[in-house]
Structure formats: C-alpha cells, structure tokens
Image: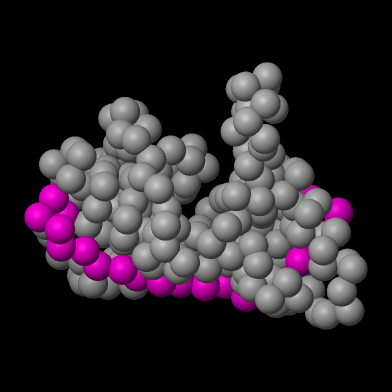
Amino acid sequence: MIQKPPFDKLVLATHNKGKVREISELMAPLGVSTVSAGELGLAEPPETETTFAGNARIKALASARGSGMPALSDDSGLAVDGLDGAPGVYAADWAELPKSERERTGVRRDFDMAMWHVWDKLSASSKAPTARFICALCLAFPDGTSHVYEGTVEGEIVWPPRGDKGFGYDPIFRALGDVQTFAEIEPSEKHAKSHRADAFAKFLKAQFGA
C-alpha cells in the first residue's frame, strides 16, 4: 500500500529534457507534481565528485536550497567493462562539444559523437562488450537532509546505433535478454527494467512504502 509522501511537489534537479520526461512519468501515478531546475532558472552546479551518488547529492541539494522545495536528482551513466568502466560519471562529458561548435550551433552535446567514441575505443580492444547503466537518485530537502538510492541494469554495447525512442547512449545499449536496444523499445517497457527503474523502486519503497 502506498503511503502519503512527505511532499506533493518535487523539483527535478536536471536540465536534461529526457530525464525530466522519464522521471515525471514515473512520479505522475503517485500524485506528485514536478518542475525542473531548468524551468525554475536554477543554475547547474559543478559536478565535482567521482561517483554517481556524490554528483547526485550535489545536484539535489543545490536545487532544494535554491527552490526551497524537496528536490530529486538523477546522476547516471554508462559503464563499459572493456573501457575499464568509462565513460562512467563522465558520460555526458564525452558528448560535450567544443566551445566554438556550441556557439556556432547552439547545441551543447552530441551523443552521436559520444556513441561513436565508445564504439571506436571498444572495437580497438579485445574485451567483451559487456556494460551496464548505473543510476543514483538523490532526494534532498532544503535543510540539507539527503537520501541516495542506486540502481543498475546489465547489458552490452551493440553497433550500429538503433532506435529513436530513447536518449543519450540508449541506441547502443541492449539489456540482457533483449533483442532490441533501449532506444528501440517502448518507453513504458524501458521504464520497467532500466537502471532508473531499479533506483526508483528503492526510492518508492523508502519514501512511499510501495
């Protein structure tokens, strides 16, 4: 039985539209409304930690203190065994475009480029293409209290990229037991099995008794 949460509105501590969409869809059935840090005009804090949990905590606390409301952050990434866990917490950095290119195009990140770099480095090694998505969710409050919930989904890297229903590295990640990538399956199916779903289930159990 789902218990009444200690909040009815959350700030999603991200400017990533894909993450906003996914987390908002997960929160909607619980009767909790969401607003993103981007919509509130909150700045993105520097992510200076070397773990997903550490960076998730930085983002959640910044949004909670900046908005005066509870905030939920997501720090997630792709860890490829053949690349010794890279890109890991630097998954977004691998997609970062040079400043001149950002100014010219107005685009900050190019995940097509990032996926190509992953495959280029992986194909140059003799290691298996096993990989996992990792997610750390952090719920933080304006008083500085925070709780972290971590989840994973195991799988492998495939090439070429396939599908247009996901975001980030989804087109080159196939979960164990699947024949389609995360970008080929329906969002509802991905929500049920993803690293974010695993972390979210732990968040629900702790905060909602679900």
Residue 98 place in picture, x, y as percent: 67, 35
Q: How many marks?
A: 0
Q: Nearer the viewer, residue 3 or 198?
A: 198
Residue 155 belongs to the span the image colors magenta: yes
Asked if one can make out residue 137 in the rendered structure from this viewpoint, the answer is no
Residue under the point 64% across and 73% down: 85
Furthest-bottom residue in this view: 127
Q: Which residues are magenta?
A: 141-162
Relative to 60, residue 52 above or below: below
Asked if one can make out residue 75 in the rendered structure from this viewpoint, the answer is yes
Q: Nearer the viewer, residue 138 or 28?
A: 138
Residue 61 place in picture, x, y as percent: 24, 53
Residue 45 belongs to the span the image colors magenta: no
204 left or right, relative to 104:
left
Residue under the point 88% across and 67% down: 123
Q: Nearer the viewer, residue 108 or 179?
A: 108
Q: Nearer the viewer, residue 95 or 199?
A: 95
Q: Quadrant of the C terminus?
A: bottom left
10 left or right, relative to 162:
left
Q: Quadrant of the N terminus?
A: bottom left
Q: Quadrant of residue 193?
A: bottom right
147 left or right, relative to 49:
left
Residue under the point 29% across and 53% down: 60
Residue 120 place in picture, x, y as percent: 85, 59
Give the colour scheme shown: one colour
Residue under the point 75% across and 43% down: 112
Furthest-top residue in this view: 104
